[in-house]
């Protein structure tokens, strides 16, 4: 996120991401149940930074892994990050669906502030979507 927002520090944040991915990969190897979805999400964000289409499949993998292990909050985060990626790609309809999925996850987790934040994104995005017209 910081590397996308602050391009002047991109090299620094890319290095931080690469190190984090290396560590998370080791942890995922020893405890896939707990770390696989986190690794997939880190990889997705890294690929997003690099404008690499592999980001999409990594986000989807993170969502699936988090759901399988009942990490509702992490599934919600992965949906939300995928929605942001899709907005960047001008795919408003699919982004809206993932924001709605994130909201459901956050509701299950009783994260009311996150629900409200995502509802604001949904309210702004909905008029731009063909599925809501």
Image: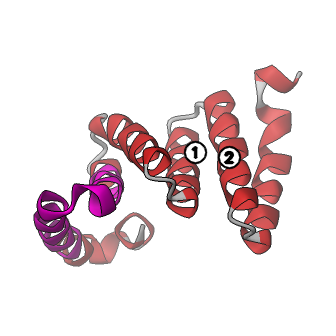
Local crowd at mark 2 within 10 Å, few (<14), some, or many (≥20)?
Answer: many
Horizontal and vertical percent for residue 125? 77, 43
Q: Which of the pair 20/69 is nearer the observer?
A: 69
Image point 26% across, 50% down: which residue?
A: 50
Residue 18: percent from the left, percent from the top?
16, 66
Residue 45, placed above or below residue 125: below
Question: Is-magenta flag for residue 117?
Answer: no
Kindly report the distance in space between the C-alpha atoms of the residues bearing marks 1 and 2. Answer: 6 Å
Residue under circle 1? 83
Q: Which residues are magenta?
A: 16-45
Which element carries disc 2, helix, strand or loop?
helix
The N terminus sits in image quarter: bottom left
Query: Quadrant of residue 91 in the image?
Result: top right
The reply to whether callout 1 and callout 2 are in contact (CB within 8 Å) is yes
Residue at the location (79% across, 48% down)? 122
Q: Is residue 1 left or right of residue 116?
A: left
Q: Nearer the viewer, residue 96 or 89?
A: 96
Q: Depth check: 120 or 101 in front?
A: 101
User: Dot 1, crowdedness within 10 Å: few (<14), some or many (≥20)?
Assistant: many
Is residue 7 toward the left or the right of residue 82 in the image?
A: left
Residue at the spot of label 2: 99
When asked about the image quadrant of residue 30, the answer is bottom left
């Amino acid at each position: 996120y910081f590397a996308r927002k602050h391009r002047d520090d991109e090299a620094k944040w890319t290095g931080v991401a690469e190190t984090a991915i290396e560590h998370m990969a080791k942890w995922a190897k020893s405890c896939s149940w707990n770390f696989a979805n986190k690794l997939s999400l880190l990889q997705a964000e890294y690929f997003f930074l690099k404008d690499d289409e592999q980001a999409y499949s990594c986000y989807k993998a993170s969502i699936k892994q988090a759901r399988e292990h009942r990490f509702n909050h992490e599934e919600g985060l992965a949906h939300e990050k995928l929605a942001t990626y899709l907005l960047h790609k001008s795919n408003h309809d699919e982004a809206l669906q993932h924001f709605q999925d994130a909201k459901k996850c956050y509701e299950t987790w009783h994260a009311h502030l996150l629900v409200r934040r995502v509802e604001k994104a949904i309210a702004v995005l909905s008029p731009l979507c063909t599925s809501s017209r």
